[in-house]
Every structure is written in structure tokens, then in C-alpha cells.
Image (spheres, rainbow, N blue to C red):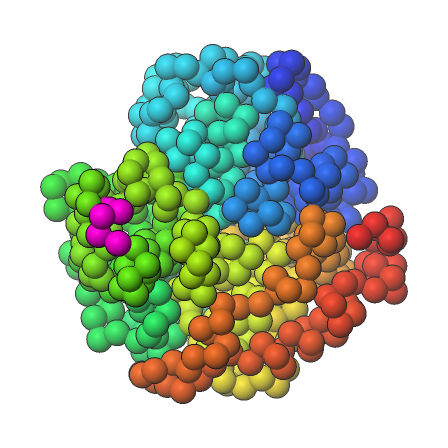
Amino acid sequence: MYGYIGKVLRINLSNRNIMLENLDEKIAQKFIGSRGLGVKTFMDEVDPKVDALSEENKFVIATGALTSSPMPTSGRYMVITKSPLTGTIAISNSGGQWGAVLKNAGYDMVIIEGKADKPVYVNIDDDKVEIKEADHLWGMVTTDVTEKLNETYPQSKVLCIGPAGEKLSLMSAVMNDIDRAAGRGGVGAVLGSKNLKAIVVKGSGKVQVPDEEKAKKVNLEKIKILRADPVAGQGLPTYGTAVLVNIINENGVHPVKNFQESYTDKADLISGEAMTENCLVKKNACYRCPIACGRQVKLKDGTECGGPEYETLWSFGSDCDMYDLDAINRANMLCNEYGLDTISAGATIAAAMELYQRGYIKDEEIEDDGLSLNWGDAEAVVGWTKKMGLREGFGDKLADGSYRLCESYGAEEYAMTVKKQELPAYDPRAIQGHGITYAVNNRGGCHIKGYMINPEILGYPEKLDRFSLEGKAGYAKVFHDLTAVIDSLGLCVFTTFGLGAPDYVDMYNAVCGDIYNVDTLLEAGDRIWTLEKIFNLRAGIDKSQDTLPKRLLKTPIPEGPSKGNVHRLDVLLPEYYSVRGWDENGIPTEETLRELGLEEYIGTF
């Protein structure tokens, strides 16, 4: 097989059985790889109504068709499981080096099932796979786990959970290479529920391609395009994703104080420019990445650690009305150490601050913690992050996210979530197309699976009026489908700053053989997105959850460049269902399922 390795590793933690299975090449090609192949595999093996933290849930790690291939940004892998945070399908993506090494070890997918009777880790060294005891690692933060396992297995790469995953926090992440995260949906808690602390990988293999010279040529062509692009070739390499802070804020799209406002005159204090000037040590690139948006920063105490993304600068910063860059860096480091999703962590603190502002949370509830819930309190933001990671004090209540926190006070309207997952750093009242991608997202509140910021703010592939409704539903569908393709290829979504669907066809065909054209590749993305929707429908996630928080539908933005706007979901949601070929209740029609080759699911939801 070209591109694909052709092997699936199945590990049953209950009986300690390890099996090697052949990959179905036709299924792999139909669903591309990584996200698509993982979702298909998960759908075939797991009841969508399963308790996400039960032994019956499975945990699929899938590499892409192009992961570890000679193509730019080809280091990504995907985690697929049922989310304990949302109850939806969880599709969490991560970069770094770990995914490429897993594929080099000889595996397209790893399927984790069952539950160990005590803490364990898995060591994969090419075709040698072992389940090992991990009592000595339980309770360790990610840097300590990685260091300890690297001592035992030199030159290996480590994926692990931190204390948050062990303690089943519903915002816990799976970490790899210390500061790379498969972050959203509480996937770390699924590994915690299985008593699996880490997976160590070392691989010596190589992805086979039909024509190495052709693959090399295509790779160089795409790198040239990316380096010539003003965002992929200049903005992201220079400032990281934090380049967005001032851009988004200047458009009045940057949420402040739990989405009570959408603009701040203090954004520059936590911008990419400020980070570069005050604390940047170096860039930190993922596998085969010419963009290198990752940051390494230095704290005021001299500690060096992974730097925050745009979303993290916002969630701990503006969303909490806090503009201390060093405090944000410290909170980000704690999230990496304890294994917390930074968007959910910061946004949950912001929701708690609004609950305190409005009198729901009383002083006596938090007095034993010695921390405030006042807007802008830098030390409180850092302190609550640590307490969430350890489930200490009031941090125990925060650790399961803002929806459950607000629900416990009968104040769900202050949870800025979709399907119980915290929204990211863009106010949909001022970007109508991006708002519809939030509402219908299969994994809940998410920006990256349909990044309409590209056309509505940044002008990729063309500049759209962000307040207009015309054509936005169709545009959102294309972005959803294309992102499903990119995820399944094992590439980074930031390659869309320069590359388009024909480029992804070129790369797939150069690595895997002449299989796809633009139309069939986008159809595969549609197939993947629709299959995820089917899982959610079968799990009981219906049209009522394809919505946005009441504030974003009813309360106009009070001040700033986007003053007076609300999101028009009432118009865009029916249009989105229509362009997808779904009925008025958001259910794929039989005709649509047949067109996408999903006939086997007719009548199953």
C-alpha cells in the first residue's frame, strides 16, 4: 500500500491482549484516513449511547493518509472517542512529532478498548508492543512523565495524560511531546477512566510512495506556495497564532468578560507582537512544518515552556478581562502540565467570574481556596487553573466545564457553550458564517473544524462581508467538508493559508496513488461530516442542540466596531440543513445518504 501502512494495532486493557489487524484499504480510501477512518471504525464498533467513561467506550488514535509522508505539516494524528463533556463524537487533533513516529512504527491506527485493573502505560517499539505497570507514573505532570519514560526508552516520543485526566476532568486533554494537545471534549478523561497513563512510541519505518521524485516535487511546490503567503509565510512564523489578537479585536469580534463585550482597548498587551517583544525564546515547529507557529516562551521567573496559542491568550486573558501576559503564560504551562484544554479552562473561569459578578457564587464558597473571582485578577486565574487540574476546593466544581458549573446555579444562560463545550475566541454576533459553524459543529463549540474567519476576516480565498447572511450556509458547508479532508489527510488546517482543494488532491495522489479529484475529495469530506452527524443523532443529539447561547442570539454587542449585532441563526440554520441535503430537523435524507455511499446507515437513527 502507498501512503497507508496497512496495519491496525488493537490493545485490550482488560485482558492485556494485543492484536495486529490488516487495514481495509477500500474503507481507508473511502474515508481518507485519520479523522474519517477513525470515525468510521468507531461507528462500527461502539454504541453511540455508551457511557463515555465506561469500559465499553473505545479510544481510537488514527494517523492520516499523509501522516509522516514527504508533505508539509504531515505530523498530525486524531483521537476519536465519545466525548464525556458533550456526549457527541469527539474528534480531537494534535501535532508535534508523536503522530508521525506512530506511523513510522508501522500503524495506521491504534484501538484502545477495555479498562486496566490498575495504572498502565503502553510501549510501542516498531513491532514490539508491551503493556507495562504505571503506578510510579500516576499523579505525575506531563513533563515528569515524559522525562521518566524518555530515560527508560531513549529517543522515543511520549503521549500521556496529566492529573486532570486521571481525575476524570471533563475538560482534560491528551498531551504529546509535552505541550501539544488533543484538547477538546475531555478525551483525557477517557484514558483516565481506562487507567492508561501514557503511550510511548519509537518507529524506524518509512511511508512508501509510488514515485519519490514526484512526491518530492509536489512537496516543494506546496512549501513554496505556503512560504509566499502573507499569513502562512509571514504572520504565523513571526508571531504565531497570537498574530490574530489585534486583528480580531480591531474587528470587534474579540469576546471580553464571558462574551459580555467584544472589544477591548487592552488587547495589544497580550498580542503576538507583545509576546515576541517580551517573552519569546524561539519558534517551535511540528513535524515537517514550514510555518512553525508554535512558541517557546520564558516566564518572569526564568522558566522556559511552551507558549500560548491565540485561543489561550484570549480565554485566560480578555475573556477574564485580564491582561497580564506572564500570568497567561503560567496558566498555559499549568494546562500543559496537568493536561487541561486551555479554551475550556479559561472560559470556565470567565463564566465563574460572571456568576460571581451576578451574585450566584458567594464569597463563602471560595473563601477556603484563598482566591477571588474578580475580573482581571491575574493570580486568581493562575490559581484556579491549578485547582482545576487537581480538582481541589472549588476547582473541583470548575473541572467539569462552564455548562455544568452554570447549570448547578440554575444559570445556564451564562455558559457560552454549544453542546456543553466552551466557545472559542470569536464572537459570532459579528461573523455570521462563523456563527453557523459553531451551532452545527459535530463536536460542540469549535472554531477549527470550519474556520470561516478565513473568508470573513482574513480574506481567504476571498473577502466576504462578515455581517451578510447571503451564501454563508453554503460557504460554511464547504469549509466543514474541506477541514474534514485536511484532518483525515493528517495535515494542518493552517495550510489553507495558501493551499486549496486542488493542492490537497495533488498531495494525496502523489503519496497514495491517483485516486481522488477535487469533486470526489470534497465528497469524501461531506461523507465524513455526515457520518459524524449520524453518530450524534444516534447518541440523542438532535436539532435542539444545533444552537448558540441565548446572549448571542438576543443581546446585541454593546460597543465597539460590531456594535448592535446579534447572530441570525434563525435564517442560517434552515439554509445549512438544506445545502447539506438534510431535512428540516437536521436529519440526512435517504437520497443524501445514498449519494455519499452511506446506505448502510439508512433507518439507523
Q: Is residue 206 above or below residue 15?
A: below
Judge from the rendering whether residue 464 lies leftward or rightward of residue 165; answer left or right: right
Judge from the rendering whether residue 230 lies leftward or rightward of residue 78; answer left or right: left
Asked whether residue 180 appears in the rendered view, the answer is no
Nearest the camera: 304 or 403?
403
Residue 573, given in percent of the width and then of the height, sits at: 64, 74
Residue range (magenta) = 362-366
What's the residue at 55%, 80% (across, down)? 568
> Does the magenta portion include 285?
no
Q: Is residue 416 above or below residue 575?
A: above
Nearest the camera: 10 or 510?
10
Nearest the camera: 200 or 51?
51
What's the residue at 66%, 30% (across, down)? 56
What's the residue at 62%, 27% (across, down)? 55
> Does the magenta portion include 364?
yes
Residue 476, given in percent of the width and then of the height, sits at: 61, 71
Extreme residue toward the left, this view: 301
Residue 449, given in percent of the width and then of the height, sits at: 56, 59
Asked whether residue 362 appears in the rendered view, the answer is yes
The N terminus sits in image quarter: top right
Q: Give the quadrant of residue 209.
A: top right
Judge from the rendering whether residue 482 lies leftward or rightward of residue 256; answer left or right: right
Which secondary structure type mostly characterizes the magenta part of the structure? helix
Judge from the rendering whether residue 477 lies leftward or rightward of residue 461; answer left or right: right
